[in-house]
Image (cartoon, rainbow, N blue to C red):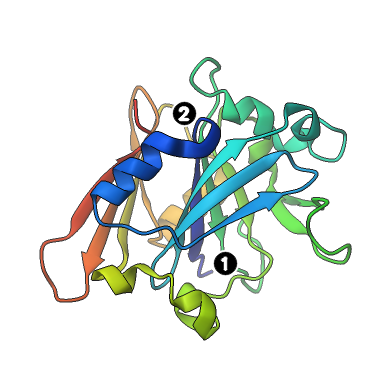
Amino acid sequence: MVVALDHIFVFTTLGAARERAYLASLGLQETYSRVHPGQGTENVCYAFRSMYLELLWLTDKDEAESSDIRRTGLAARSEWRTQSTSPFGFAWRPAAEHPCSIWQYRPPYLPKDTSIPVAVESDDASHPFVFGTPGGIPPCNWDSGRQRGLQMGGGFDDIAAVTLYSPVTCGPGLTAMERAGALRILSAESWLLELEISRIQGDKSLHLKLPLC
């Protein structure tokens, strides 16, 4: 089974001011941002050739803890600094079959006939949120209007390597991604994500680490 990463999210504080400044200092530009009505979250995304990085923050705890959203654990995940939860989410691109046992999540901001497959392992908020993306079109195949915000304009090509430092033994969905070569998982005392970003001209890759302490 081929399991490709579509995007990765990391929870930040409201507005992600520090993270946005950090990524800007590295030369990255914001591709787009989005509000998630009914889910109580908002984001800003940085898109590369084949996947994108999403900074995500909580805007309405009541919405995030409502009956339709509660199982995602998004409210608890947003408080990872004070709770033993994971700040990360990993989305796989649609495949012929799901890489693990799933349940269907139907957030209010999506059309009623659209759902998000979520790995059952994500019920434990101390683990990363592992899920499938409904669309799953690589950024390089987006329409021309959206492509104008890709990082290639700043000389960056793609996320070439993903390393997750994890204090827990990850579940079947995430380990399936690792077996497919989508990321590497290493044991650690605390959560850390390291991304290697390649450059179009073949210059030295950029390395970034999240979350910020």
Nearest to viewer (mark 1 / mark 2): 1
Residue 199's place in the image compared with 25, above or below, is below
Image side of residue 59 versus residue 175, left or right? right
Q: Residue at x 53, y 19 (%)?
A: 84
**Sequence-first disc among 1 and 2:** 1
Residue linked to disc 1? 93
Q: Residue furthest left?
A: 203
Report which residue position mark 2 lands on: 168
Amino acid, disc 1: Arg
Q: Is residue 88 left or right of residue 41?
A: left
Q: What mark, if any, has residue 178 been given in the picture?
A: none
**Which residue appears at 11% of the width and 62% of the height?**
204
Three-letter code for the amino acid on which mark 2 is drawn: Val
Q: Residues within 10 Å of mark 2 (few under 14, many from 20)?
A: some
Q: Secondary structure at mark 2?
A: loop
Q: Position of 9 compared to 179: left or right?
A: right
Image x and y of residue 153, in percent:
31, 73
In depth, the one of 41 and 211 nearer the eye is 41
Residue 79 occupies which quadrant of the picture? top right
Q: Residue at x 23, y 65 (%)?
A: 198
Question: Taking 145 as reference, is 85 above or below it?
Answer: above
Circles 1 and 2, Cβ within 8 Å, touching? The answer is: no
Task: Where is residue 55? Give x, y as percent.
Answer: 49, 45
